[in-house]
Image (spheres, coloured by chain):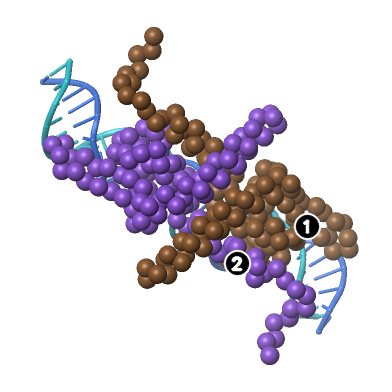
Chain colours: A purple, B brown, C cyan, D blue
Amino acid sequence: MEKTKEAKPHTWDECTKSILPVRDALEVLSGKWKLPIIISLMFGNKRFSQIAKEVPGITDKMLSKELRELESNDLVKRTVYDSIPVVVEYSLTEYGHSLEIVIKTLRDWGVAHRKRMMVES
Amino acid sequence: MEKTKEAKPHTWDECTKSILPVRDALEVLSGKWKLPIIISLMFGNKRFSQIAKEVPGITDKMLSKELRELESNDLVKRTVYDSIPVVVEYSLTEYGHSLEIVIKTLRDWGVAHRKRMMVES
DNA sequence: TTTTTCACTATCCTTTTGTATACTACTTAC
DNA sequence: GTAAGTAGTATACAAAAGGATAGTGAAAAA
């Protein structure tokens, strides 16, 4: 009964079935800093200034903003210890750790990509 | 001979060994549109307006810009057929196809993520 | 003859992202 | 007393990304 003019089989629906979940993932992980921060936390719980040292180039403002977003998406946990100078520790949640395979895949591709760039130059 | 004050073992070098390749990958793939465009081309070679239809929400301007960038990174190939109305076909290069596993991993995570969001709401 | 298709480009605008610099308030070390 | 480390926030600004709308020129369809 529909009047949509489709004469030939289209890849449209299979295509959006891939695009939509990828967009969901990108919404949470997009930007220059979120994955590097998560990687840094994969090597252990860290304090604010430690992360700042391990993620090259990030400013305090960006780190603060990105950590807040990651926390609100339940990827990172923020724990405050009211010790003599207050200490704040960031850690990956279990859900955050589920990104390990995504990061490994991306890192492997990045390594191959860099190798390729070197050969070209 | 170096005066850098490092008393305890640091995760710094292992950490940057992961961060740098991931940044290399992000540089090529970052933004809202590049991966969706690549996904669309994984389902077959397409013309400009076909891609525009399959990637929901993209404008001509963005599509044009992103295709140029993907082409300059050797992920996408642009072929002009000088037929009666000129036809331009876009296809993935072999290198572009090497992103299949990255996209699959990201899509799987995105599917799980969406499922998780639904439960929460 | 007007509209549509094709593959874009041009212009203007808003939003997001990122940078730089300074500042808070407390404590320990020199 | 001064500096450095703790975890950030405030302000101002620049740059990049993205969105909305319109236009191009040729040909084919209505």
* Residue position for label 2: A17
Side of A79 where A54 appears, left or right? right
Q: Which residue is mark 1?
A: B89
Residue at image location 39% in from the left, 9% down from the top:
B1
Label 2 to label 1: alpha-carbon separation: 23 Å
Residue B61 visible at all: no
Above or below, B74 against A114 in this view is below
Q: Position of A59 compared to B66: left or right?
A: left
Is A69 located above or below residue A61 in the figure? below
Residue B25 higher or lower than B113, as above or below: above
Residue A60 at x, y percent in the picture: 33, 39
Q: Looking at the image, which is closer to me, A17 or A6?
A: A17
Do the residues bearing badges 2 and 1 touch, measured as CB atoms within 8 Å? no
Who is closer to the viewer here, A92 or B79?
A: A92
What secondary structure is found at the residue carrying circle 1? Answer: strand
- Amino acid of disc 2: Lys
Task: Please indicate, yes or no, whether residue A32 appears anywhere in the rendered image.
Answer: yes
Residue at image point 45% right, 56% down: A28
Secondary structure under tag 2 reads helix
The answer to which image quadrant residue B2 occupies is top left
Out of D25 and A40, give the one closest to the viewer: A40
Residue at image location 41% in from the left, 30% down from the top: B12
Q: How far from the left and from the top, in percent, is residue B99?
A: 64, 49
Mark 1 surroundings: few (<14), some (14-19) or many (≥20) residues within 10 A: some
Residue D7 locus on image (x, y percent): 25, 41
Q: Nearer the viewer, residue D6 or B49?
A: D6
Q: Label 2: how many residues lie within 10 Å, few (<14), some (14-19) or many (20+)?
A: few
